[in-house]
Image: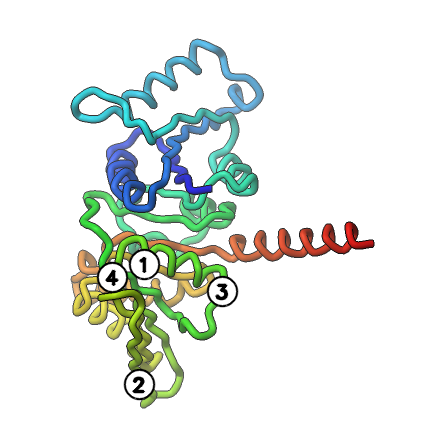
């Protein structure tokens, strides 16, 4: 399952996401599948050979390196149907670890106006989604920040996923929690692995946006991590960044774990337990 899925519309933003994904995949020893979905009604049930070949050629040109070669760890996939449905089917089949998408700005991932393509993609994806902002190149991952989380109480499956990333990249792992207690400040640091640390910090909820932005800048955060049901914190961070005219400071890659990711795991564990019980009987 150590594969990354990158849907593409052949745009420059998508191309930048591919270059980021290639470097990301090198460190995680992953393969990449670049996919294009044909969403038109005419192609929903049948894709003419001529059109299929034309799209395949586009995909080859899209993934081609500057020297004209095709990368060995990048595969091509063409699917019929709506993008969100195709991605959902691929994730349900446990084919991919992450879905990677390019976006003009990471901080506009959760717009206040619902129903955008990005929002629908998150809602339908049963895999974590990595959002790569346009123009952001891969410079390594040395510090990962989990927004609105406590490592002591986080779901173990998400925790293992994040921990695996931090160990592969040799990154410090930061957890920033928001509390309703106005004077409740907390800071705890533990050794994670050799020279890397696991850091837990709590700040008052009423200064969450300001505190998060300061933390991102002060600690050179390379990757933000958050759960979909905590997007309010990210929207407040965006609003504060807009007011302070410093949105570029939070325009960094964002890894999102949607509720569907956990729900699917729970359903599979339940089905597994039922199967084991049936065998025992």
The residue where tag 1 is placed is 166
Comparing 279 with 237, the one in front is 279
Residue 164 image-quadrant placement: bottom left
Give the residue at x 40% y 73%.
150
- Callouts 3 and 1 close, C-beta under 8 Å: no
Tell which circle, 3 or 1, labels the residue nearer the N-terminal end.
3
**Sequence order check, earlier mark of 2 and 3:** 3
Whether 222 is drawn above or below 75: the answer is: below
Q: Which residue is mark 4?
A: 143
| Residue 78 left/right relative to 262 | left
Q: Looking at the image, do the residues carrying marks 2 and 1 touch, with CB atoms under 8 Å apart?
A: no
Q: Earlier in the sequence, mark 2 or mark 4?
A: 4
**Is residue 242 rendered to the left or right of residue 155?**
left
Residue 117 found in image quarter: top left
| Image coordinates for residue 6, horizontal then vertical, percent | 37, 37
As helix, strand or loop, the secondary structure at mark 2 comes to loop
Q: Nearer the viewer, residue 281 or 49?
A: 281
Q: Position of residue 39 (x, y in %)?
A: 48, 28
Mark 3: give few (<14), some (14-19) or many (20+) Cα within 10 Å: few
Determine the residue positioned at 22% across, 70% down. 215
Left or right of 265, for residue 223: left
- As measured in the structure, the alpha-carbon distance from the residue carrying label 2 to the one carrying label 3 is 25 Å
The residue labelled by disc 2 is 185
Give the answer, above or below, for where 145 lies relative to 277.
Answer: below
Pointer 4 local density, CA inside 10 Å: few below 14, some 14–19, many at least 20: many
Viewer-nearest of discs 2 and 4: 4
Q: CA distance from mark 4 to mark 3?
A: 20 Å
Secondary structure category for the residue under label 4: strand
Residue linked to disc 3: 156
Q: Residue at x 47, y 42 (%)?
A: 1
Residue 7 at what x, y percent from top left?
Answer: 39, 35
């Amino acid at each position: 399952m150590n594969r990354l899925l990158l849907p593409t519309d052949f745009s420059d933003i998508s191309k930048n996401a591919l270059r980021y994904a290639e470097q990301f995949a090198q460190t995680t020893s992953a393969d990449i599948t670049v996919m294009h979905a044909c969403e038109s009604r005419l192609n929903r049930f049948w894709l003419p050979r001529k059109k299929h070949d034309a799209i395949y050629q586009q995909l080859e040109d899209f993934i081609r390196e500057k020297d004209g070669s095709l990368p060995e760890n990048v595969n091509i996939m063409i699917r019929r149907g709506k993008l969100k449905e195709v991605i959902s089917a691929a994730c349900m089949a446990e084919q991919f670890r992450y879905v990677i998408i390019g976006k003009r700005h990471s901080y506009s991932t959760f717009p206040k106006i619902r129903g955008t393509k990005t929002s629908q993609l998150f809602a339908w994806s049963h895999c974590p989604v990595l959002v790569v902002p346009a123009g952001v190149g891969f410079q390594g991952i040395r510090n990962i920040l989990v927004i609105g989380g406590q490592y002591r109480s986080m779901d173990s499956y998400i925790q293992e996923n994040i921990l695996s990333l931090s160990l592969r990249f040799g990154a410090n792992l930061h957890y920033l929690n928001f509390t309703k207690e106005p004077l409740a400040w907390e800071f705890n640091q533990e050794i994670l692995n050799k020279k890397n640390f696991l850091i837990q910090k709590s700040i008052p909820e009423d200064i969450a946006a300001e505190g998060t932005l300061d933390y991102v800048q002060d600690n050179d955060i390379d990757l933000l991590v958050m759960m979909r049901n905590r997007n309010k914190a990210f929207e407040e961070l965006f609003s504060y960044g807009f007011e302070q005219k410093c949105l570029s400071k939070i325009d960094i890659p964002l890894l999102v774990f949607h509720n569907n990711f956990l729900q699917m795991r729970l359903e599979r564990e339940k089905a597994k337990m039922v199967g084991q019980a049936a065998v025992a009987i």
